[in-house]
Amino acid sequence: MSVSNFSIGIVGPGRLGQALGRLLYSSGEPVVAIAGRDSPPAFSRTEAASRFIGSGVQAAVTRELPGVASRILIAVPDDALAAAAAELAFAPEPVLAALHTCGSRGPEALRPLEQRGTSCGTLHPLQTVANPEQGAADLPGCHFGITASGQALAWACEICASIGGRALMIPAESRPLCHAAAVMASNYMVAMIDAAVTLFAQAGAGEEEARKALAPLIRAAVANSLSSGPAEALTGPIERGDTQTISAHLRAFAEASESVPQTVRDLYSSAGLHTITLARRKSPEIDREIIEALLRGEQEP
C-alpha cells in the first residue's frame, strides 16, 4: 500500500485507538492501518483491532506505519508515548502530522518526530472509554482537548468535525491541570461510587443491590451539579451544619474499623473538607467549625 497525503495510521490497539479508528473509518476517513507490539499474543490483539475498525485496515507494527500512512494518531498510555514517538521517528519515511491522545502531555512528547519535520499536537478526548464499543458510541459530542499548530491543528479540528466532537483549545502549560480535572471528574468519581457502595454493602445490602439503590441518588446529584452548579446542588449534613450526623458517621466508622477500609474513611473526611468549602460558598452564615475539626481528627466525634 502506498502512502497518500491523507492516509491515517493509528498506534495503539487498545480501547481508545479502536474507538477512534472505527469512528474515523465510518465517517469516510482513510484509516489504513493500526499498529501494536509485534510479539504474540500482542499482535493477535492488533489484528482483532484492525477487524473492529473496518474492512481493509491493516494490522501492523509501529515502525511500519510511516511506510503506509502520512498522518499518525498515537493512542497509547502516557508511559509508552516516548517509545512510540521514537520508533516512528526512526522509520525512513517522514510523517506529515502526528497527534497523541495523552491528556497531561503536550506536543513536546513527540519531539523525535518534530525534529524530523512532523507537525505535532495533541487530541485528548474528555470521555471515559471502558471498551471500544462504548467509546465509539460516546465519543461523538464530547470535547477534545487540543494543543497544536500548523498541519497538526488543522488535522485535529478535522477529526473533531468528522466524528462529531467539539474542539477545545488548551495551552500546553495548562494541560496537566486540565487532565487532573478530567481524572477527578471520571476516575475519582468511580472511586467515590465504589466507596459509597462499600459502605452501603456493609450495612447489609449486597453489592449489586447497593449499586441499584444508590443509582438514582448519584444520577440526580450529578445532573443537578451540572445544571445548577455544585454549590446550588449541594444538600446534606455538611450543607445544613449538622454536627451530630457527621459525628454519628465517624463513630460508625470507628466501630466498624475492621470492615470499612481506611481508604474509604480517609476519602469521607477529605471529600467532606472540600464539601465544607463548597457549603460556605452557598450558606456562609452557618457555623461549620466543629464539623471541620471532626473531619480533620482534631476533635472526638
Image (cartoon, rainbow, N blue to C red):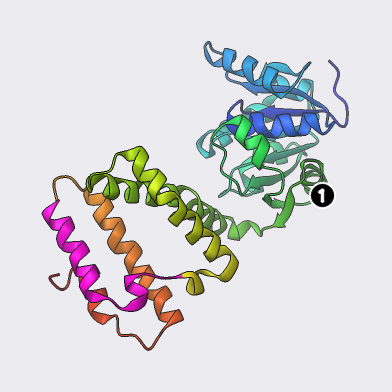
Residue 146 versus residue 87 in the image, above or below:
below
Residue 3 versus residue 218 in the image, above or below:
above
Left or right of residue 103, residue 96 in this image? right
> Which residue is situated farthest in the right direction here?
5
The image quarter containing residue 29 is top right
Q: Is residue 267 magenta?
A: no
Q: Residue at x 32, y 39 (%)?
A: 207
* Quadrant housing the N terminus: top right
The reply to whether residue 296 is in sight is no
Q: Amino acid at mark 1?
A: Gly
* Quadrant housing the C terminus: bottom left
Residue 177 versus residue 162 in the image, above or below:
below
Q: What is the x, y in percent for residue 142?
A: 67, 49
Q: Residue at x 39, y 51 (%)?
A: 214
The reply to whether residue 122 is in sight is yes
Foreground pick, 214 / 222 = 214
Q: Which residues are magenta?
A: 234-256
Foreground pick, 99 / 127 = 127
Q: What is the x, y in percent for residue 75?
A: 62, 34
> Which residue is situated farthest in the top direction here?
40
Q: Report the magenta stretch's main SS.
A: helix
At mark 1, the secondary structure is helix
Q: Residue at x 85, y 31 (%)?
A: 28
Q: What is the x, y in percent for residue 23?
A: 74, 34
Q: Is residue 254 magenta?
A: yes
Question: Label 1 belongs to which residue?
Answer: 150
Q: What is the x, y in percent for residue 178?
A: 57, 57
> Which residue is situated farthest in the bottom direction here?
285
Left or right of residue 271, residue 9 in this image? right
The image quarter containing residue 201 is top left
Q: Residue at x 57, y 63 (%)?
A: 226
The image quarter containing residue 288 is bottom left
